[in-house]
């Protein structure tokens, strides 16, 4: 046990041990980002093999180093992941008509080094498409349904550029196609649509190693809803100012633990330390739920009136505590609300307290968007695109990162439950608005950047 090195006092060691043993504290992911710029090649097969070789070389010791650090420090580390330079950039010189061989190479590399996922089968199209972007989008259904560990993302909007509605219009049919080609639509969980995508996000499915990143870097994603929940239960009746202060103090301690682990892994692996992402990422386990944290503030059920205000308090306090604990906070950092992965969210949806519209409102104040939201399999593609457009608008106008992981479950109807298992949890199929958005989506073009995008 090495928690007593310079980052933590002896009393903090004991408190951290309690968090680990009884409050679900863990390091959700240690993600190694790797630049693929030097793999560029005009031959697709050669490029794919260069990518596989480089990832295996850079990450050959990742899994056992993470296991070693977890055992020495006594901190559970759930996932080991890889992220890479967006493939639409790296593969542009091949002029290939399909990038599926690259997806296969990424999948093989992740399997060989023991990584749970590899992110970066991605395109950045917030202002327009290159030929390579079009090829990557066309490759996504096959890439995500015929590999086990490959994840992808598409950036379609930013505060500086506005919303590429031509790209948004393509996302609905694309997501439907991916869902229909996989059992229970599960492959759609490996694709995120972004506004204001960040370059150092360690969380899947949206991780990629941005063009401005180092040759390689370790990014750590922490968790801790259970720790916050336990603290709030001890504060029964306290006013919300004190609640905010205590969340900040707790986030401070969690962040120090995360940075300690990240720096140790990066030192042993011989690579840069990037950031610690202080996001509160829930799991399906009881007591490890963002919804339960909000309910512990006094809401009868997550989704009722006051939920957005409570989530805003939580998200802000987590960011403040993390920023005080580390100068290297990055990624998304805040509260995640993935519906299927949070048992409290599923319960709230089943009981009618939480609707798609309320979730949309909540995403305006948290660190991610509509995440792991299941909808009926026959939802029109243009409706899916319109849901994405609404979320992108929230991100663009508020100058914040938002993402959409929406799962149209084949054959499912509102109220159905789909058990994905593991960290993906149980999906409750939510109804969508029955009125059409077709003509709006068909207009295409670009919604211009808002005035607040002109900051220089």
Image: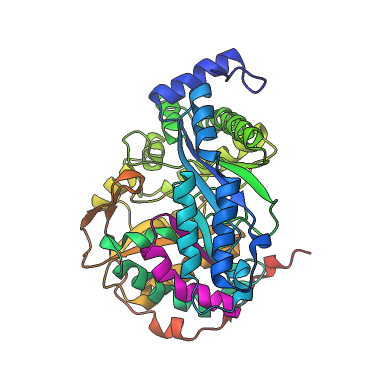
Name which residue lies at 39% across and 60% down: 147
Q: Which residue occupies 60% across, 75% down?
A: 94
The quarter holding residue 48 reads bottom right
Is 218 on the left-hand or right-hand side of 280? right
Rendered position, 239 above or below 430: above
As drawn, 185 above or below 21: below
- Residue 392: x, y in percent? 52, 66
Position of residue 428 in the picture relative to residue 444 (left or right): left
Q: Is residue 61 magenta?
A: no
Q: Residue furthest right?
A: 456
**Toward the viewer: 263 or 63?**
63
Q: Nearer the viewer, residue 243 or 221?
A: 221
Can you give x and y, in whole percent of width and height, for residue 347 in the image?
27, 46
Q: Where is residue 316 in the image (x, y as percent from the top left)?
A: 57, 42
Residue 87, percent from left and from top: 57, 65
In this orientation, does residue 234 appear?
no
Q: Residue at x 59, y 60 (%)?
A: 50
From the viewer's side, name the closer residue of 96 and 218: 96
111 versus 74 height, above or below: below
| Image quadrant occupied by the C terminus | bottom right
Q: Is residue 118 left or right of residue 409?
A: right
Quadrant assignment, res 406 = bottom left
Q: Which colour scheme is used?
A: rainbow
Image position of 33 with respect to 86: above or below: above
First to last magenta residue range: 130-156
Q: How many labels does the image show?
A: 0
């Amino acid at each position: 046990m090495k928690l007593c090195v310079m980052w933590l006092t002896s009393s903090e060691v004991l408190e951290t041990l309690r968090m680990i043993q009884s409050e679900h504290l863990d390091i959700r992911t240690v993600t190694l980002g790797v630049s693929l710029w030097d793999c560029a090649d005009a031959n697709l097969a050669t490029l794919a093999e260069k990518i596989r070789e480089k990832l295996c070389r850079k990450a050959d010791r990742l899994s056992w180093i993470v296991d070693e650090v977890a055992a020495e420090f006594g901190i559970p580390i759930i996932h080991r992941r890889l992220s890479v330079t967006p493939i639409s950039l790296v593969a542009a010189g091949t002029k290939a008509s399909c990038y599926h061989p690259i997806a296969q190479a990424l999948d093989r590399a992740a399997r060989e080094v023991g990584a749970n996922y590899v992110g970066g089968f991605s395109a950045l199209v917030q202002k327009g498409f290159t030929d390579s972007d079009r090829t990557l989008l066309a490759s996504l259904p096959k890439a995500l349904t015929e590999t086990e560990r490959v994840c992808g993302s598409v950036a379609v909007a930013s505060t500086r550029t506005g919303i590429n509605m031509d790209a948004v219009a393509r996302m609905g049919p694309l997501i439907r196609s991916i869902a229909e080609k996989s059992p229970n639509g599960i492959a759609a969980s490996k694709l995120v649509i972004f506004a204001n995508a960040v370059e150092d996000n360690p969380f899947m499915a949206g991780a990629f190693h941005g063009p401005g990143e180092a040759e390689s870097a370790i990014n750590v994603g922490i968790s801790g809803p259970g720790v916050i929940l336990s603290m709030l239960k001890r504060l029964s009746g306290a006013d919300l100012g004190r609640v905010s202060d205590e969340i900040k103090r707790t986030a401070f301690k969690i962040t120090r633990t995360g940075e300690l682990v990240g720096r140790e892994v990066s030192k042993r692996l011989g690579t840069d330390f990037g950031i610690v992402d202080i996001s509160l990422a829930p799991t399906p386990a009881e007591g490890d739920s963002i919804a339960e944290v909000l309910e512990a503030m006094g809401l009868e059920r997550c989704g009722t009136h006051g939920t957005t205000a409570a989530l805003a308090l939580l998200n802000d306090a987590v960011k403040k505590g993390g920023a005080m604990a580390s100068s290297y906070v990055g990624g998304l950092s805040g509260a995640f609300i993935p519906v299927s992965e949070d048992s409290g969210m599923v319960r709230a949806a089943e009981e009618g307290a939480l609707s798609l519209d309320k979730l949309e409102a909540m995403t305006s104040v948290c660190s991610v968007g509509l995440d792991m939201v299941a909808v009926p399999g026959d939802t029109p593609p243009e409706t899916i695109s319109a849901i994405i457009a609404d979320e992108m608008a929230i991100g663009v106008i508020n100058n914040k990162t938002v993402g959409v992981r929406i799962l149209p479950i084949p054959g499912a109807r509102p109220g159905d439950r789909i058990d994905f298992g593991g960290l993906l949890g149980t999906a409750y199929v939510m109804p969508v608005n029955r009125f059409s958005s077709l003509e709006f989506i068909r207009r295409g073009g670009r919604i211009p950047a808002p005035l607040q995008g002109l900051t220089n």
